[in-house]
Image (cartoon, coloured by chain):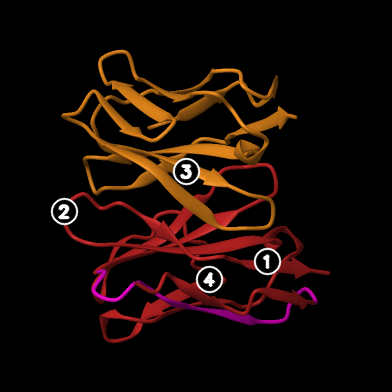
Amino acid sequence: EAGVAQSPRYKIIEKRQSVAFWCNPISGHATLYWYQQILGQGPKLLIQFQNNGVVDDSQLPKDRFSAERLKGVDSTLKIQPAKLEDSAVYLCASSGQGYYEQYFGPGTRLTVT
Amino acid sequence: KQEVTQIPAALSVPEGENLVLNCSFTDSAIYNLQWFRQDPGKGLTSLLLIQSSQREQTSGRLNASLDKSSGRSTLYIAASQPGDSATYLCAVRHTGGFKTIFGAGTRLFVKA
């Protein structure tokens, strides 16, 4: 079974530029999550999708971050414009029905200069 | 508001030692608790998932327990090996909305 795929793995941008991350969850998983992990901290949930719908986006900075999940499968997370404090690893995870065990992708390391 | 704390923040032990990692949470209304391992520069690997109705789960040398009433979970690692060196994270999934909250992790170093 293929795992959660993310791209790109690394990205360096200047502040005020925009950036987008892509995630492909495990096949058949209805729930998809985006997390932000700052160095030395645990991941923080940004947004959670159930199929196409948003379940929780209470910690998503909506003035600069946006996310969508196309046809209940792939998802993109966008930052526009980026700030220095957005430097972090962005992790995507997915889970199936029932126990909601989460499986994570390798992450995208973003550096904003 | 749910808060998740992991103690200690870092731990160094000699190879072969049995050890316990702690995770505490403030709100007992949880759906499940999941333990992960994270290697430097990598994503998270799921180790064990405990449902709210369960007391413990085991996988190989790992055993995780859950005590909802006291707001605590422990991850027991038997006969530690250098390959166990990593950061261990616990994550609590809340019953209301199923929001997941992570602890900051325990960095484990097992010396050969």
Mark 4–mark 2 CB contact (< 8 Å): no
Tell me the CA gap for discs 2 and 1.
31 Å
Q: Mark 4 falls on what kind of element?
A: strand
**Which stretch did the figure color magenta?**
A14-29
The residue lying furthest to the right in this view is A113
Tell me the CA gap for discs 4 and 2.
30 Å
Which three-letter amino acid code belongs to the residue tagged 2?
Answer: Gly
Quadrant in the rendering for residue B7: top right
Who comes first in sequence, dot 4 or dot 2?
A: 4
The residue indicated by pointer 4 is: A65
* Observer-nearest of B96 and A73: A73
Which mark is on residue A75? none
Give the overall secondary structure of the magenta segment.
loop
Which mark is on residue A109? 1
> Tag 4: Cα neighbours inside 10 Å, few (<14), some, or many (≥20)?
some
Chain letter, disc 1 residue? A
Percent position of residue B94, x then y: 28, 39
Chain letter, disc 3 residue? B
The residue indicated by pointer 3 is: B36
The residue indicated by pointer 2 is: A98
Let me know if marks 3 and 2 both belong to one chain.
no
